[in-house]
């Protein structure tokens, strides 16, 4: 009597793309809700809480700071625990955060929610988790897979703002948050426990036998090597530039005299542009020196800052939004490619957890831009400061070791 073992319907070669699709899904929900819908919620919040623009931008900044602070611990957890538990805790944090946000009566209370539960949700079921999963499943075509996976943030940025904009025309923002909560649970919970039970087979990872892939990096080793800090210094200004433009986009649109519906369309356009940017940088990242791709992204970022400074009509603002999206789209695939090529897969979660601290830098830019407007009645001084950070960052990348 022979005992046979059942074979999976899909081999790892094909199932790994299911994992990519799952990464797209969780990022669409988490990032789409917490990042891309913020510009739409900021308009009723600005009126209801009678706040300054700087104080309102502190809301999203606190969340980004929180994400940066918890990401190293999330990265360690991803290297040590089953990912389905990590994502489930993140979903629970999102549910609690959205529930509490529906009952706030002051901006200070909103700050507390966005500084506590929202960062956990963002870190545990966002890009860090998705990129770690993709890196484990892919050796060949890793750049393409990272680019496609990171598109989830933009798919969420296309779908959810359009949904939220429509809902806001029919109901208050608190009811809209309840709708998002229900949607998140229905989409994420079943997929997490159905798809993440399977791990890559040993035969799929045997090819990863070089010293870089199998090396375990300690925290001290990660934080004392230029392999970590040069990409960090390069990515941080890109993150800052994108944040300053993205989170103030709704208010900038209104300042020019455009309708609220235009804001939703521009947010969707930035998401489409980011999708194109992620595919472009992801696909080329498997074949071209990562430094060249970074310099291209840096140049597009400078162009976006110049265009937004000149924007006084929908055409220029549209061009600025496209440039912003293309440059912002480069961040996740480039970071994943640069770090995975130089640190390998065994410690990737931990390395990316520390790399996500670039969000701390990005968190300052919306506040800086809002404060600049409150003081000078213009965002242009903030744009000049950001441009002055991008230039030396590009120069520093010359010393990044080629892989």
Image (cartoon, helix red, strand yellow):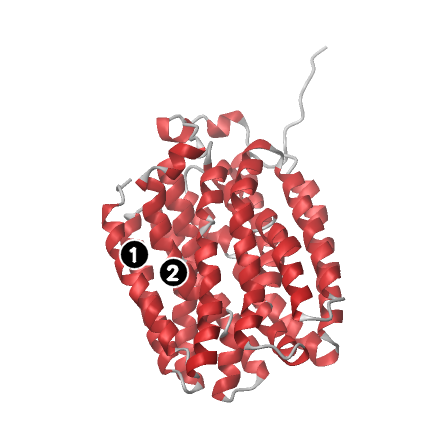
* Distance in Å between CA atoms under marks 2 and 1: 9 Å
Q: Give residue 266's position: percent from left, percent from top.
A: 50, 75
In this picture, is 355 found above or below 167?
above
Q: Give residue 14's position: percent from left, percent from top.
A: 54, 40
The residue that label 2 is drawn on is 238
Quadrant including the C terminus: top left
Of mark 2 and mark 1, the one earlier in the sequence is 2
In this picture, is 274 found above or below 381?
above
Quadrant including the N terminus: top right
Residue 254 has which mark? none
The residue that label 1 is drawn on is 393
Name the residue located 28 percent from the left edge and 51 percent from the top edge. Answer: 291
In this picture, is 125 found above or below 386?
above
Q: Is residue 220 visible in this depiction of the protein?
A: yes
Q: Secondary structure at mark 1?
A: helix
**Circles 2, 1 touching at the beta carbon (< 8 Å):** yes
Of 131 and 347, nearer the camera is: 347
Q: Give residue 145's position: percent from left, percent from top.
A: 46, 47
Q: Give residue 185's position: percent from left, percent from top.
A: 73, 54
């Amino acid at each position: 009597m022979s005992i046979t073992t059942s074979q999976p319907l899909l081999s790892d070669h094909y199932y790994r793309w299911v994992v990519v699709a799952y990464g797209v899904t969780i990022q669409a929900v988490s990032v789409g809700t917490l990042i891309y819908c913020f510009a739409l919620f900021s308009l009723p919040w600005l009126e209801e809480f009678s706040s300054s623009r700087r104080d309102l931008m502190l809301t999203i900044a606190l969340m980004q700071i929180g994400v940066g602070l918890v990401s190293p611990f999330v990265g360690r957890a991803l290297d040590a625990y089953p990912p389905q538990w990590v994502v489930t805790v993140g979903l629970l944090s999102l549910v609690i955060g959205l529930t509490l946000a529906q009952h706030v009566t002051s901006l200070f209370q909103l700050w507390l929610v966005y500084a506590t539960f929202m960062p956990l949700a963002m870190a545990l079921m966002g890009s860090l988790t998705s990129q770690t999963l993709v890196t484990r499943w892919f050796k060949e075509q890793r750049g393409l897979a990272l680019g496609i996976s990171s598109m989830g943030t933009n798919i969420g940025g296309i779908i959810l703002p359009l949904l939220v904009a429509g809902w806001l025309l029919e109901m208050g923002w608190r009811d809209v948050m309840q709708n998002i909560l229900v949607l998140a649970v229905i989409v994420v919970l079943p997929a997490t426990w159905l798809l993440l039970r399977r791990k890559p087979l040993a035969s799929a990872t045997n090819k990863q036998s070089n010293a870089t892939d199998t090396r375990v990096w300690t925290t001290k080793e990660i934080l004392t090597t230029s392999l970590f800090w040069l990409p960090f210094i390069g990515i941080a200004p890109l993150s800052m530039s994108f944040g300053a433009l993205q989170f103030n986009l709704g208010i900038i649109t209104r300042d020019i005299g455009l309708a609220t519906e235009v804001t939703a369309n521009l947010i969707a356009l930035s998401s489409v542009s980011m999708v194109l940017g992620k595919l472009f940088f992801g696909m080329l990242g498997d074949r071209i020196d990562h430094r060249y791709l970074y310099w291209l992204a840096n140049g597009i970022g400078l162009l976006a800052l110049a265009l937004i400074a000149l924007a006084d009509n929908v055409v220029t603002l549209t061009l600025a939004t496209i440039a912003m999206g293309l440059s912002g789209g480069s961040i996740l695939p480039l970071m994943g490619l640069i770090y995975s090529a130089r640190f390998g897969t065994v410690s990737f979660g931990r390395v990316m957890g520390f790399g996500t601290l670039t969000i701390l830098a990005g968190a300052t830019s919306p506040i800086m831009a809002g404060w600049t407007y409150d003081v000078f009645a213009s965002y242009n001084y903030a744009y000049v400061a950001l441009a002055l950070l991008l230039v030396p960052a590009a120069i520093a990348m010359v010393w990044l070791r080629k892989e």
